[in-house]
Amino acid sequence: MKSSLAVVAVVLTVAIAGCDRRAAGSDSDAHAEAPVAGSQPGVLTASPSVPEAKPVAPSTASLEGLPHFAAVYPEAEVQGDPLLADGTAGPGGVVTFVTEASPDTVIAFYRERAEADGLATMMALNQGEARAYGAQKQATGASVNVVASPAEDRTSVQLTWSAGL
C-alpha cells in the first residue's frame, strides 16, 4: 500500500508541476514539448536542459523551517529521513510520517494552511479510506501534495512540497 501511495504522490507532484509551467508560459515550454533524442512516443523522459535537484542533508532544523503550508502535522512521528532538495523551482522535499489523526483531519489541516497562504486547490481525491490533496500558487510555483491513508491504528501520510520562487 505504501508503494501505491508513493506512486500517487509522485504522479500528483508531476501533474501540478506541469500545470505551473504551461500556465506561466515560460520559455521551458519549448523544451517540455520537444522530444528527447532516443525517446519513445508516449514515454515521458527528462529534458537534458533541466538541472537536477541537489539533495540537502536533512536535519531537525530543516523541518522546522518548512513553509507554513507544508509544516509537519502536529505531534506526528516522522518516518525516516525527509528528502530535501533545492532546484530551479525553489526548495522542496518529501517527508513521510504517521499520526493518530484521521485522513480527513490531516487533509483538512493542509487544505486550511494552503488556502491561508494563497494556494489554490488543484486536486482532491478520495479512494476508499485514503485521501489526497494538492494545491499550488501559480504566481510563485509554491505547491503542496498530501496523501493520507489509514495504517493499522494510525494514519500514514506522505507530504510533498515546493516553496516556490
Image (cartoon, rainbow, N blue to C red):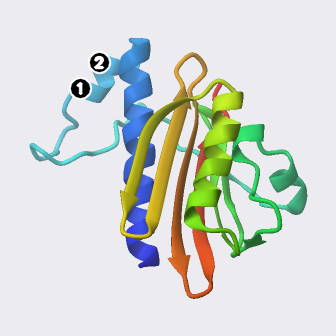
Q: Which residue in the rendered view is the most extreme toward the left?
A: 41
Q: Crowdedness of circle 1 by 10 Å Cα count: few (<14), some, many (20+)?
A: few
Disc 2 designates what residue?
Answer: 30
Residue 54 in view: no
Compare residues 111 and 51 and report the one nearer the observer.
111
Compared to residue 24, the image places residue 87 above or below, namely below
Residue 145 in view: yes
Amino acid carrying mark 1 in the image = Glu
For the N terminus, the quadrant is bottom left
Left or right relative to 37: residue 12? right
Q: Crowdedness of circle 2 by 10 Å Cα count: few (<14), some, many (20+)?
A: few
Compare residues 3 and 49 and report the one nearer the observer.
3
Compared to residue 9, the image places residue 103 above or below, namely below
Q: On residue 4, which mark appears?
A: none
Q: Position of residue 136 (x, y in %)?
A: 53, 31
Marks 1/2 in contact by CB < 8 Å: the verdict is yes
Q: Position of residue 76 (x, y in %)?
A: 77, 69
Residue at image point 53% right, 76% down: 150
Count of numbered tags: 2
Compare residues 36 and 9 and report the one nearer the observer.
9
Q: Which residue in the rendered view is the most extreme toward the bottom?
A: 152
Residue at image point 74% right, 71% down: 78
Secondary structure under badge 1? Answer: helix
Disc 1 to disc 2, how far (Cα)?
5 Å
Q: On residue 33, which mark appears?
A: 1
Residue at image point 78% right, 45% down: 66
For the C terminus, the quadrant is top right
Amino acid carrying mark 2 in the image = Ala
Secondary structure under badge 2? Answer: helix
Compared to residue 4, the image places residue 137 above or below, namely above
Q: Position of residue 6 (x, y in %)?
A: 45, 65
Q: Position of residue 149 (x, y in %)?
A: 51, 70
